[in-house]
Image (tube, rainbow, N blue to C red):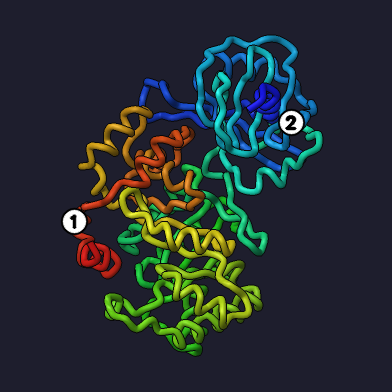
């Protein structure tokens, strides 16, 4: 690629840095970790994960508050910095959309397309989200502003559902937390900054979760609450009643998201009947509750492609979310690709595989490389696939650590993790329907 590309990268990198960064508390050694800074790029909010090097540190100090970047070859944006930066040039081989690099010692570039290159760059960082990046940047000049007022907490970053509703990127899962313990644990999670809480009718802890929502001082509108329609309900009227029961049990006027827990009743999860008619009936009840303002968003869980196709064909309002089992070594790429292609956000439950991946040498080695814990690596893996992880823990320190994921897994290491085959033993969870199906299908 021509050297102009490098100049573009530099420009974008300067786009918008919020110097209040999320930090890691799990280790004193910060090698391999990055700071996250917020920016406005053509008015679009972005976050950059910075490399831990002298170039990035100096860039934060000298970057103007507002500037413009020029386009080059419809691949990148560039900006000539006011003063030179320290360099650590290397042959990158290939630039990826979202990469922020330094060409020479004074040209900042952001790439919005991927391509092979023979040029040498100094790595500055990477845009965290690259979806629709080329559309946001366009091919004309772009305006870049630091967004220093933006809250930098990782737990306050959002995805946007197809109906415009914002949903926090990391949720707190409550599966297997007893109802009597749910209030205390949800309050702890909220105190630590979690704003997205995930429960279900089948968990038996909606009342406990609801009690925490009544007790917290955080305003209701700042919280995102999900529950799930029981998998056994495949009838319209039963679904209508169950929606109202969840609202009453949690003492809420509305839920932010309600999803069908499974396309099949749990007792028949290994069977071949997909309960198409029953899911259409249950979905109609969710649609009506959504239109009535009882639910801000609706979705599904554990739905395969054929189950999604059924709802797309027979629904008025298509699903906005599909929550599936997804973790390193067990990533349902076909369902994820199909869902994302149809603007359905994919949530990942059990992203840490109930601790089973702690025994993987490959995962352990990569976690050590990035100086993070295995759960942090697992959660970051999901985020880089544009999934919404829902880690569950009753340990306060683990709750906090699960949100400290401000590092970037390299393209090469992501490819290695994506290719990893799982022979994980889920321990006590082996006999739950979803995990049993995974084990039977191996």
Q: Is residue 60 left or right of residue 416?
A: right
Q: Is residue 372 left or right of residue 278?
A: left
Residue visible at 43% across and 70% down in the picture: 303
Q: Quadrant of the N terminus?
A: top right
In the image, which is nearer the foreground, mark 2 or mark 1? Answer: 2
Whether residue 289 appears in this view of the structure is yes
Label 2 environment density (alpha carbons within 10 Å; few <14, some 14–19, many ≥20): many
Residue visible at 48% across and 52% down in the picture: 387
Q: Which residue is mark 1?
A: 427
120 or 345: nearer the eye? 120
Q: Which residue is mark 2?
A: 72
Q: Is residue 357 above or below residue 336?
A: above
- State how many labels appear: 2
169 or 88: nearer the eye? 88
Mark carried by residue 359: none
Q: Is residue 273 left or right of residue 134?
A: left
Residue visible at 57% across and 44% down in the picture: 156
Label 2 to label 1: alpha-carbon separation: 54 Å
Of pointers 2 and 1, the one earlier in the residue sequence: 2
Label 1 environment density (alpha carbons within 10 Å; few <14, some 14–19, many ≥20): few
């Amino acid at each position: 690629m021509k050297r102009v590309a490098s100049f573009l990268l530099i420009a974008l990198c300067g786009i918008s840095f919020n110097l209040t960064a999320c930090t890691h508390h799990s280790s004193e050694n910060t090698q391999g970790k990055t700071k996250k800074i917020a920016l406005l790029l053509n008015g679009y909010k972005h976050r950059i994960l910075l490399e831990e090097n002298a170039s990035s540190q100096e860039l934060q100090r000298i970057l103007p508050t507002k500037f413009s970047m020029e386009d080059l070859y419809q691949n990148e944006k560039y900006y000539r910095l006011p003063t030179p930066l320290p360099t650590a040039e290397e042959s990158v081989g290939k630039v990826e959309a979202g990469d922020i690099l330094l060409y020479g010692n004074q040209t900042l570039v952001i790439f919005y397309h991927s391509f092979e290159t023979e040029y040498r760059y100094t790595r500055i960082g990477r845009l965290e989200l690259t979806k629709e990046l080329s559309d946001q940047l366009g091919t004309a000049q772009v305006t870049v502003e630091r967004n220093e007022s933006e809250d930098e907490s990782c737990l306050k970053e959002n995805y946007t559902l197809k109906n415009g509703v914002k949903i926090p990127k990391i949720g707190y899962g409550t599966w297997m937390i007893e109802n009597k313990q749910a209030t205390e644990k949800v309050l702890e999670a909220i105190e630590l900054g979690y704003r997205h809480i995930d429960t279900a009718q089948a968990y038996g802890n909606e009342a406990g979760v609801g009690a925490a929502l009544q007790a917290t001082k955080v305003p209701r509108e700042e919280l995102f609450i999900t529950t799930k329609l029981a998998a056994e309900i495949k009838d319209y009227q039963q679904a209508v009643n169950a929606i109202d029961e969840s609202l009453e049990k949690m003492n809420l006027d509305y839920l932010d998201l309600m999803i069908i827990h499974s396309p099949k009743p749990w007792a028949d999860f290994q069977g071949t009947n997909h309960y198409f008619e029953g899911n259409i009936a249950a979905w109609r009840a969710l649609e009506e509750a959504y239109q009535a303002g009882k639910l801000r968003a609706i979705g599904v869980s554990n739905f395969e492609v054929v189950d999604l196709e059924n709802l797309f064909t027979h629904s008025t309002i298509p699903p906005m979310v599909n929550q599936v089992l997804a973790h390193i070594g067990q990533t349902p790429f076909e369902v994820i690709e199909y869902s994302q292609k149809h603007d359905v956000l994919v949530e990942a439950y059990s992203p840490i595989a109930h601790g089973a991946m702690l025994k993987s040498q490959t995962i352990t080695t990569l976690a050590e490389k990035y100086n993070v814990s295995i759960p942090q690596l697992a959660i970051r893996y999901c985020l880089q696939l544009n999934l919404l992880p829902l880690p569950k823990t009753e340990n306060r320190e683990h709750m906090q650590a699960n949100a400290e994921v401000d590092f970037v897994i390299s393209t090469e290491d992501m490819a290695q993790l994506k290719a990893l085959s799982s022979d994980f033993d889920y321990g006590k969870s082996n006999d739950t329907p979803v995990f049993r199906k995974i084990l039977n299908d191996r």
